[in-house]
Image (cartoon, coloured by chain):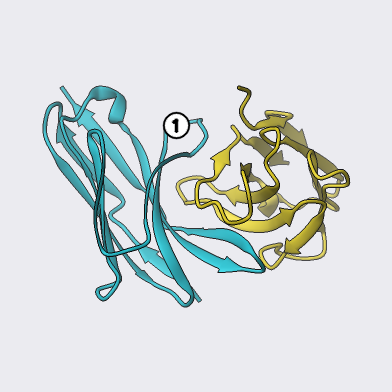
Amino acid sequence: GAGVSQTPSNKVTEKGKYVELRCDPISGHTALYWYRQSLGQGPEFLIYFQGTGAADDSGLPNDRFFAVRPEGSVSTLKIQRTERGDSAVYLCASSQTSGSYEQFFGPGTRLTVL
Amino acid sequence: GQSLEQPSEVTAVEGAIVQINCTYQTSGFYGLSWYQQHDGGAPTFLSYNALDGLEETGRFSSFLSRSDSYGYLLLQELQMKDSASYFCAVRRVENAGNMLTFGGGTRLMVKP
């Protein structure tokens, strides 16, 4: 079956602009996670959704970052007033339930802020 | 806070065995996972240990010692396609979710 998909695969924007990154999880997976990965480092947790609600957003770096999952499937990560330090690969992962230890990752969106 | 330490790079030859160590300091530890990531690719799940001991999955095995806050991934019969980055990750359970805290990754280079 289809895995986790993310669009766009690459996004180049200018400092100060607004961007939206989309994640389409595996069908039927109720838990969804966003991570951010900088070059040469491990993924860093941002936010976790169980169904439609953000159950844990403790990893969001500041209030410029926001994510939604209105119907419990597709999620959008939104970044306002982008900064050069936001440049990274943004990874989305889903798992069958919130209790599942295996997470399935998408290919990521590479965000470059000029 | 949580921190994980693993070697940054390991080199081995095809057909050999390699062990990638991971030590961690964390609160609320539930288990240790291992993920593989090829350049430009998505992390993919390899194994998970919640209890002490060895878990074997084909050519890959993973070990955990909770008392030592230590684990390792063992790769046998190395193949060129095993060249990738390997991440250990602590699973913490909060707010009914399973958040992962990743180490910095070990870049494995397999040479012919």
Element type where label 1 sits in the image = loop
Q: Which percent across, then down, holds residue A76?
A: 81, 43
Residue at screen point 66% across, 57% down: A46
Q: Which percent across, then down, holds residue A45?
A: 60, 57
Question: Considering only vertical position in the picture, is A25 above or below A67?
Answer: above
Q: Which percent across, then down, holds residue B90?
A: 44, 62
- Any idea which chain is the cyan one in this picture? B
Residue linked to disc 1? B39
Question: Considering only vertical position in the picture, is B24 above or below A64?
Answer: below
Residue at screen point 64% across, 32% down: A4
Residue at screen point 22% across, 34% down: B59
What amino acid type is highlighted by mark number 1?
Answer: Asp
Q: Is residue A90 visible?
A: no
Is B35 situated left or right of A83 in this image? Answer: left
Residue at screen point 63% across, 50% down: A97
Q: Which percent across, then down, holds residue B30?
A: 45, 67
Q: Is residue B87 visible?
A: yes
